Image (spheres, helix red, strand yellow):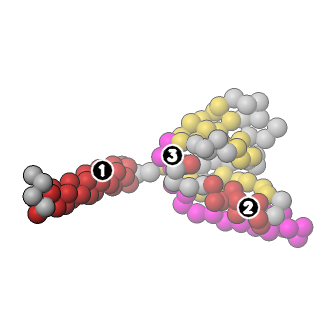
Amino acid sequence: MKDTMILKDGTTIELEAGASLGAIQVSESDRSAMLRTWEKLTEENLAEIQIQNGSGLTVGTYRDLVLVSETSVVSTGGAVTTTYSLRGKTEVEKRLDNVEAGQAIQDGAIADLGEVSSLLAEQIEGGEV
C-alpha cells in the first residue's frame, strides 16, 4: 500500500514514494483526475492534513499549509504525475488570517447595527416610538 495524505474534509490522496511537504508527488490516470485532486488542495482543506504510511499509521499531522506550486508531467499514455509544493503559513500570514476573521465579525456587527438604526428611524418617523 502507498502512503496517503488525508485532507481536512477527509479526502484521501495516494502519494508516490519519497514524498515530502515540499515535494508531494501524486500519480493520476489522466488530466481530469489530476485537476480534481488539485482542486481539493484549498486553503480550507490544507488547514489540517495527515500523512499516513502504507500500514495506515499517521506519521505526520500538519496545520495551516499553503500550496506554493504544482508541476505536472504527462506520460505518453496520458497518465499525469504531479509534484505539489506545500509549506506552512508564516506568522505574518497567520496574523493576517486572524485580522481578516476579526474584520468579518466587525463587518457583520456594523451591518446589524445599521439595520437596527434604520428600523428605529422608521419607527420614529412613523410615530411608533
Label 2, on which residue? 34
* Main secondary-structure element of the magenta-colored stretch: strand
Quadrant of the rendered image containing residue 27: bottom right
Q: Residue at x 60, y 44 (%)?
A: 9
Q: Earlier in the sequence, mark 3 or mark 2?
A: 2
Question: Residue lying farthest right?
Answer: 77
Label 3, on which residue? 47
Q: Earlier in the sequence, mark 1 or mark 2?
A: 2
Residue interval drawn in magenta: 63-83
Q: Secondary structure at mark 2?
A: helix
Label 1, on which residue? 105
Q: Amino acid at mark 3?
A: Ala
Q: Amino acid at mark 2?
A: Met
| 107 drawn magenta | no
Residue 64: x and y in percent read 48, 46
Question: Residue lying farthest front?
Answer: 127
Residue 111: x and y in percent read 26, 58
Q: CA distance from mark 3 to mark 2?
A: 21 Å
* Horizontal side, residue 50 vs residue 97: left or right: right
Local packing at callout 3 (Cα closer than 10 Å; few below 14, some 14-19, many 20+) is some
